Amino acid sequence: MQISASILSTENKIEAINKLNNTNIDYIHFDIMDGSFVENKAFSIEEIRKYSSITNKKIDAHFMVENPIYFLNNLKNIDFDIFTFHIEVDNVDEIIKKLKKTNYKIGLAIKPNTNINTLKSYLEDIDLILIMSVEPGYGGQKFIENTYNRIKEIKEMIKDKNILLEVDGGINNSNIKLLDVDISVVGSYITNSNNYQMQINNLK
């Protein structure tokens, strides 16, 4: 399993990125929010450019926004590894079509209460499914226990398709061992610590 470190809850994001650069973390996770799709607002276009320029890690970008195409159009030179947006927005097909013209892995995120069957029509076109184990919008929330069942059901749905599974929200060194996924997004468990590498080792 790979670990993606969310810097959402950190006060000094540049300091956090520099600390993560000196660890063996697999990804740095950007939680981009527009204040519309979710109440919170985080990571402006300018901040994404600034933060992405100082990391030596792969960037796992999660767009909790109403209009992912706006960000896609304004971030053409950013070297994202994964560009994930939500299945709950409009024009999912149009967004996937535009993403196919990039080098990004295409991720589709799903909220805890969204029916997983909505994913079925997109399985041929995406590289990753991000299962939210908290309501998107804020860091530091408690893991929703039903996520384990959703992971099993989604794994059964994708079967032998080459789609990565990622989980985000409330993950720590206790519940991570119960997650049968490819990538776990972990925030405060790592970034609230004085020793990032020790916490990453605990997770791995």
Image: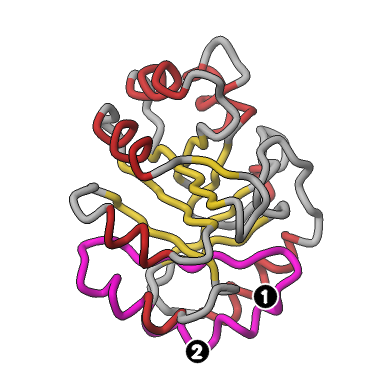
Q: Position of residue 12 (x, y in %)?
A: 49, 18
What's the residue type where badge 2 is placed?
A: Ser
The reply to whether callout 2 and callout 1 are in contact (CB within 8 Å) is: no
**Reading the chain from its start, which is encountered first: label 2 or label 1?**
2
Q: Which amino acid lies under the numbered mark 1 shown in the image of this protein?
A: Glu
**Mark 2 Cα within 10 Å, few/some/many (few <14, many 20+)?**
few
Along the line of sight, the residue nearer the viewer: 49 or 17: 49
Vertical placement of 22 versus 203: above or below?
A: above
At 27% from the left and 62% from the top, the residue drawn is 73
Q: How many marks?
A: 2
Q: Which residues are magenta?
A: 96-125
Residue 50 is marked as none
The colour scheme applied to this rendered structure is: secondary structure
Q: Position of residue 15 (x, y in %)?
A: 42, 16
Q: Indicate the position of residue 85 as horizontal and vertical percent values.
A: 47, 64
Residue under numbered circle 2: 121
Does residue 125 appear left or right of residue 36 in this picture? left
Depth check, mark 2 against mark 1: the one in front is 2
Q: Residue at x 49, y 68 (%)?
A: 108
Residue 133 in magenta stretch: no
In the figure, is residue 154 to the left or right of 197?
right
Residue receiving disc 1: 153
Quarter of the image where one finds residue 110: bottom right
* Helix, strand or loop under label 2: helix
**x, y (%) of residue 82?**
36, 56
The reply to whether the magenta stretch includes residue 104 is yes
Name the one closer to the observer, 180 or 74.
Answer: 74
Callout 1 secondary element: helix
Q: Residues within 10 Å of mark 1 (few under 14, many from 20)?
A: some
